[in-house]
Structure formats: C-alpha cells, structure tokens
Amino acid sequence: MTTTQTVPRLFLDALAGQDFAALASALDGDAHLRALVPPGLREARGAAEVRATFTRWFGDTLGFELVASGAKEIGPRLHLWWRARLRAARLGDGWFVVEQQAFADTGADGRITRMTLLCSGYCPDER
C-alpha cells in the first residue's frame, strides 16, 4: 500500500472507531482545516486543534456508526467522504445522520497538510 493509500485508510478507520489520537496521526503537525458547516465557516490550525474539532463533532456519543466512507485521488489531492449515524445528548432525542466531503493536500510523508471540508449538518435519521 502506498502512503497516499495508507493515510486516507488510517484517517477513515480512526474516525470509524472514534479514535481521535489515531486520526491526528494522519495529520501533519501544522495541518490546516477549513470547514463549511452549519452555521458557517470554521478553521482549525495544527494537528491538536483539528483533532479537537473532530472530537467535538463525533465524540461524546450515545451511539456511533460510520455507515459509508471512501477515498480516492484526484490528481495530487485526496477526496475523502464519510456518512455517520449517531446519537448524542447535545443533538436531542433520536438518531442523526451527517455527511462530510473533504479535499486534502498531503506533504512529502503522505500526511494531511490541508483539508477543506463541506458538511451536511446533523439531520434527523428517518429510519
């Protein structure tokens, strides 16, 4: 497996397991995240801050499942996407789904240096 295949798999597997320390290991120390989420643009700089952002979004849940995900290369960029189903007290009663699409640049070691992300927001799960 090449580095460009290893890092996306590491990132998505870590997210699926809510292992935010492992997720951070897929990031360059100076990684930059720009995310368009309801209610607006959010930015995080540095692996620790990006990790904290993903922990806020996907941690502290009563139930969590990564129902679908994928990664592919588009020229020099990575396209990562995932859909999660979760329950969390902060969201209210019931289950919610959220999907995020991300495009990422990587450094020489394959770790993510920059990620630009678009989020659907948490939507009530109709199942």
Image (cartoon, rainbow, N blue to C red):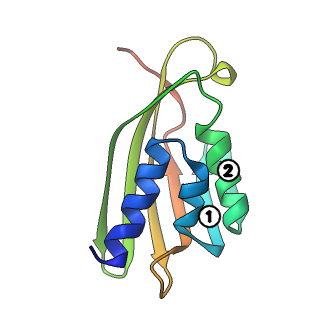
Which one is in front in this view, the residue at disc 1 or the one at disc 2?
2
Q: Is residue 75 visible?
A: yes
Where is residue 40? Give x, y as percent: 67, 48
**Relative side of 99 to 75, left or right:** right
Where is residue 95? Give x, y as percent: 49, 18
Image vertical order of residue 123 relative to residue 117, above or below = above
Element type where label 1 sits in the image:
strand
Element type where label 2 sits in the image:
helix
Q: Is residue 43 visible?
A: no
* Residue at x 56% of width, y 72% of height: 114
Amino acid type shown at disc 2: Thr
Task: Report how many numbered discs are placed on residues in the image.
Answer: 2
Where is residue 29? Give x, y as percent: 66, 74
**Relative side of 49 to 118, left or right:** right
Q: Quadrant of the C terminus?
A: top left
Quadrant housing residue 68: top left
* Residue at x 43% of width, y 35% of height: 84
Neighbor class of circle 2 (other Cα within 10 Å; few <14, some 14-19, many 20+) is some
Q: Earlier in the sequence, mark 1 or mark 2?
A: 1
* Residue at x 63% of width, y 72% of height: 31
The numbered dot on residue 33 is: 1
The numbered dot on residue 53 is: 2
Label 1 and label 2: CA atoms lie apart by 9 Å
Neighbor class of circle 1 (other Cα within 10 Å; few <14, some 14-19, many 20+) is many
Image vertical order of residue 22 relative to residue 114, above or below = above
* Residue at x 61% of width, y 48% of height: 54
Amino acid type shown at disc 1: Leu
